[in-house]
Amino acid sequence: VTIGQIVSHSAGFPAWKPFYALADSPEKALDVITRVAPAYEAGTRVIYSDLGYILLGKLLETLTATRLDV
């Protein structure tokens, strides 16, 4: 999966996951995202998904060593 696919909602992530039931912290939500099965082959469809943007936010925080809210 590429950053371009994440930004264009074509990374294969399902539209959503019920994080309120699957994770009780942001770290656990990221763990859920990294283990979720693809809904389709990356690059073959476009489905709006929060999962990719949550993952992208964590990537930006890691690369910049800064929280997104800063």
Image (cartoon, grey):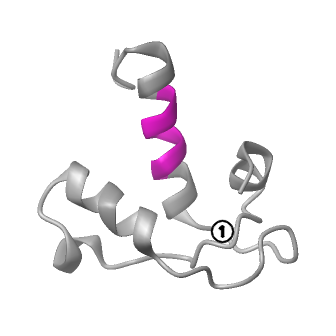
Dividing the image into 4 quarters, which one contains the C terminus? Answer: top left
The residue at the point 77 percent across, 70 percent down is: 42
Q: Which residue is mark 1?
A: 48
Provide the residue span drawn in magenta. 54-60
The residue at the point 71 percent across, 57 percent down is: 1
Of all residues, the one furthest to the left in this rendering is: 24
- Residue 55 among those drawn in magenta: yes
Tell me the SS state at disc 1: loop
Query: Residue 38 at what x, y percent from top left?
Result: 61, 79
> Hey, what amino acid is under mark 1?
Tyr
Please tell me how crowded label 1 is: few (under 14), some (14-19), or many (20+) other residues with Cα within 10 Å: some
Residue 32: name its quadrant: bottom left
- Residue 59 among those drawn in magenta: yes
Of all residues, the one furthest to the right in this rendering is: 44
The residue at the point 42 percent across, 65 percent down is: 33
Overall secondary structure of the magenta section: helix
Query: Residue 49 at what x, y percent from top left?
Result: 58, 67
33 above or below 59? below
